[in-house]
Amino acid sequence: MERNNNIERIIVRYLQNNITEDEMRLLMSWLNEDPANKEMFFQIKKVHDLNNTDTYPTTEYINESWERIANKISNVSESVGEAERASAGSRKRWLLSIGKYAAVAILCIGLTLGVQAFLESYKPVVYTAIDTESGPRMSHITLPDGTRVMLNASSKFNYSTKYGTSLREVYLDGEAFFDVVKNPKVPFVVKTSKQRIEVLGTTFNVLDYASDDYAITTLVSGSVKMQAIDKDGNYKEMHYLKPNQQAFVDKNTDKIILSSVKIDLSKTWVNKIYHFNNEPLSLILQRLEKIYGVNIAIENAKIKDVRYTGTFELNLPIDQVIDIINYDKQFSCVINDDKITIQ
């Protein structure tokens, strides 16, 4: 219901190039619901696209455009069945729906005509993107507000030119450690493919590669509130983390499991150390794929769930790391360039 009520606002924000990632998901979902939605959207967009030229549309063109949109609205109204119109409640909803799209059409024509001051002040949203290479390396970033971010290998990170004013929002595909500058008026938000994390001033780690079926958020200090995002872009139940707590997100079920952990930053990737404690081999090897930029296949299914505990330095070559894991010789390993087979 809320999405339908706000769709006209989202369309206008899209046309102004000011739409957020969440709003884009909602818009795409709405467009895919009904071919009529797409037709209406593109008719409105056609009128507004004149903003991309150096000339203003003529009054005649605007009138013709408005007539096309008005005719579409009229056709939609005629297609509504008599049974639906007979109900006062249904008729009210129908009128509100038609009025909604008419309002968007009028507003978009107004945006197209616009005032010169608006057009001159308009600036498209530009994103700064950082893509760390594979291999045991990391990147250090200082955001405009002084927030520090450390990116692990094979991670993607971006933020817009609007960051730091009325918005502190970043996007992550990978693993990052955040040391967030406190600003009670503007929360800091991390968005990934499957979760939204919001803080004020906090130190925390997020592990969330889009290709993985799980995500882990670990809180060192401060407080965090987070939500999983389902396949339709809807936010799930809110969860709150306290220091020394960890949230495990199962991306297949959208469930979040909270647990208490002992955090020793000296034994983490931010200090070029990888420590795993009673973790299944399949999970450990997934991490190694990201860190070293290799493909690892497990041919022996029986050893996928065997759990291991260990610590190694990230500057070690991959073959030595696998030897550390396989200290009791439970499996054999064949390495061929960047392809590794566990047998």
Image (spheres, rainbow, N blue to C red):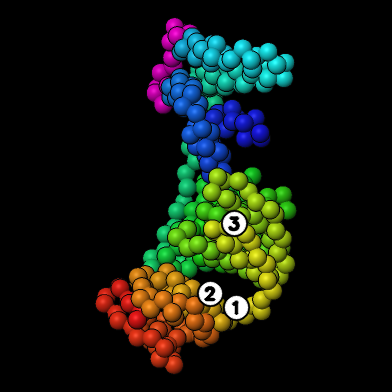
Q: Name the residue under label 3.
A: 254
The residue located at (50%, 29%) in the rendering is 34
Element class at badge 2: helix
Start-end of magenta stretch: 50-64
Q: Residue flagged by tag 3: what amino acid is it?
A: Asp
Nearer to the camera, 22 or 204: 22
- Give how far across and how far down residue 169 sits, in percent: 58, 51
Badge 1 density bin: few <14, some 14–19, many ≥20, Cα 10 Å: few
Sequence-first tag of 2 and 1: 1
Q: In which quarter of the image is the C terminus?
A: bottom left
- Give how far across and how far down residue 334 sits, in percent: 30, 81
Badge 3 density bin: few <14, some 14–19, many ≥20, Cα 10 Å: many
Q: Mark 1 points at which residue?
A: 265
Element class at badge 1: helix
Sequence-first tag of 3 and 1: 3
Nearer to the camera, 300 or 251: 300
With respect to residue 94, does 331 lie above or below? Answer: below
38 with respect to 147 (left or right) = left
